[in-house]
Amino acid sequence: MTSIKNLLDNLNNEQKKAVLNTDGPNLIVAGAGSGKTKVLTTKLAYIINEKKAWSNQILCVTFTNKAAKEMQNRVLNYLKGESSAVPWLGTFHSISVKFLRKHAEAIGFKSNFTILDTDDQKKLVRRICEAENIDAKKISPQFILALIDSWKNKGQLPDEVKLKKKNSLEDKILKVYKIYQEKTKDLNAFDFGDLILYTVHLFEKNKDIREIYRNHFKYILVDEYQDTNFIQNKWLNLIVNEKRNICCVGDDDQSIYSWRGAEIKNFLTFDKIYPNCKVFKLEQNYRSTKNILATASKLISNNNSRVGKKLWSSSNEGELVKLNCYRNGKEEAQGISDIIEGNIKNKYSLNNVSILVRAIYQTREFEERFLKIGIGYRVLGGIKFYERAEIKDAVAYLRIINQKFDDLALERVINKPRKGVGETTLKNIYEFASKNNLCLEDSIRKLVENNKFKPKIKTAFNNLISLIDKWRNDLKLVKHFDLLKLVLDESGYSSLLKDKKDLENENRLENIKELLRAMHDYDNLQNFLEHVALATSIDQEWEGEKVNLMTMHAAKGLEFDVVFLPGWEEGLFPHQKSLQEKGDFALEEERRLAYVGITRAKKEAFLSFALRRIYQGDWMDAVPSRFVNELPDKNIEKNEMKFEKEKDDFDFNQDTEIEFGEEFRSPGWNRLKKNKLLRWKK
Ligand code: ATP
Ligand code: MG
């Protein structure tokens, strides 16, 4: 067991001061890799060690469940044998779930509520649009949900949204929002935004409940504070008590979630909410080599709106940061995989090698290449395990067993396996449900009782309903993973997969086995369902020797020995869409993203761009990112990568091949020099 003295001895003076200053509000503002998260973890241990609070009287908000888990393991290790109480550690969402499970009744919900995923949300919005005669082709469910989410991030329930214009598009969507909230209440369900919004609502409407927690939490610690949005900040302020023991850490240069409503203002005006707060600045970077740090610092210095910090490092210069120019996207993937094979693989564990992209679709080219040459990889943020069809089917069965109001789950399992229930039958049941104010399950029960179905369908529903009753009873007798086995067998779902033997079905069976295995990690059905709902892409397995592929957004807070940053081209990075929508503000956020990307690297960083890339099915010329021009010459090495044409390695047809030949006569760097926007500063 590590002693607190050891923990403190491992810190520099400023870090130590920040740890020891436990009482009153404090803010730690510092650049990437300066030990902010380390300070937070040490502070947690220190508070427990000094007996300033019992461990469960500390609330610690992390950015991902993965970070929460890591912190929990460290604290558990630290607490070994001393206490069984664990701090409240988690994301805003997972901690909100904890509050809501306990107090759902106070705001008109039941504690076995469901958490909706994006598919559920879209389904619900589509259904509302149909009923309200809104053409889903004109206003997409995604657009509607994005606006609803932005209202939720601002803390506004439908009645609190104030629109300037009547009969506008927003007005239409506001109506959808209103119905959407009523429906989710009927379903006894929360979407992600609701988890936080309703927690705030719970505390605002129930002073007694709020007081319990204000008194209970003696210390509140928050990581990645620069990316909190309005409602999250309100959530925090509601549970801070008059002692104001709140410690927030963050870096304004790493604020990259404004598209989710993050407000850097929260961070910059912390001292207005908490006057006399102590501010600590950490300036030593422990993560990266000097070359990596200098590259990142130079790049971010091009932003105007920043606090401005200096970071230094006592580590060695390290390798120069490589800036590689490839002829096209495919060669970029090939080139990066060659570097990994030829050089990186022998020096580092593949787990410590990451390719960080701007847009998740960029991973495809790498996946193809890695499959071809046999490099193991994992995509964090691709199709999540829990988003696969068979997994969603199995989970839907569990969800309806958990609570009968979950219409969306019941609808999903009704025809799996097929029972001949068509659209019209389903529509009729929904109409009956809405007229009688019943959930889908109760409506089916009623309609079966009153003999309203054709005999075949009646039998099918009868069977399904009695099975659901049986499974609910089974849940009291057997473990949740054994229950799923019963459900899959008795519903006929297993034979559906087993009877048709093809590779896809075999994969599905494998996935179901994996699901059963994963269920063992959770005490009960509800905890498991909660995990499924809250698991984010970054929380997947990290075991095994594999290269990581993920977005730069997802990599926040993480660190790797080697980082590849491909696709530094105008339009891709900085991303065209965000520039069009938000102009200079977006450009600065894209630059912060670049800063986050580079500063994930400890030892080596490889930036690259391609001169041609397939965009929406066609080959397009690409212009190197303006960020390329903002890098410090002395810390980077520029290489123009040339490949021998591999026989079957190009998709070009004859035409594009000619173009390609011409292009190659004017080498990439020349083109770069010619470009007015991107003149090299030599
Ligand atoms: P980010 O801004 O990316 O979230 P951070 O400021 O939270 O970074 P940490 O992740 O806490 O930084 O620390 C970066 C790395 O430096 C970690 O590997 C950490 O263990 C190490 N580190 C931090 N402080 C020290 C120290 N005083 N001595 C040695 N290593 C340290
Ligand atoms: Mg951190």
Image (cartoon, rainbow, N blue to C red):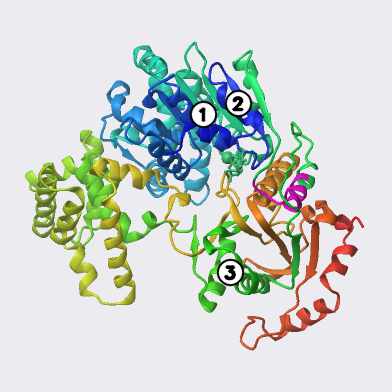
Q: Is label 2 in contact with label 1 (beta carbons under 8 Å)?
A: yes
Characterize the magenta stretch by its predominant secondary structure: helix
From the top left corner, tell me how far across and down residue 665 is, in percent: 85, 79
- Residue farthest toward the right in the current orientation of the protein: 682
Q: Which mark is residue 18?
A: 2
From the top left corner, tell me how far across and down residue 259 is, in percent: 60, 40
Q: CA distance from mark 3 to mark 2?
A: 38 Å
x 73%, y 64%: residue: 609
Q: Amino acid at mark 3?
A: Lys
Ligand 2 quadrant?
Answer: top right
Relative depth, front residue between 168 and 559: 559
- The magenta region covers 287-297
**Residue 127, image quadrant:** top left
Does residue 288 show up magenta in the picture? Answer: yes
**Residue 662, image quadrant:** bottom right
State which tag comes first along the sequence, 3 or 2: 2
Whether residue 233 can be seen here: yes
x 64%, y 34%: residue: 12
Q: Quadrant of the N terminus?
A: top left
Q: Amino acid at mark 1?
A: Lys
Relative depth, front residue between 608 and 265: 608
Against 244, residue 497 (above or below) is below
The answer to whether residue 315 is left or right of residue 180 is right
Task: Return the residue at label 3.
Answer: 345
x 34%, y 72%: residue: 504
Q: Amino acid at mark 2?
A: Ala
From the top left corner, tell me how far across and down residue 257 is, in percent: 59, 40
Against 29, residue 501 (above or below) is below
State which tag comes first along the sequence, 3 or 1: 1
Q: Which mark is residue 43?
A: 1
Q: Quadrant of the C terminus?
A: bottom right
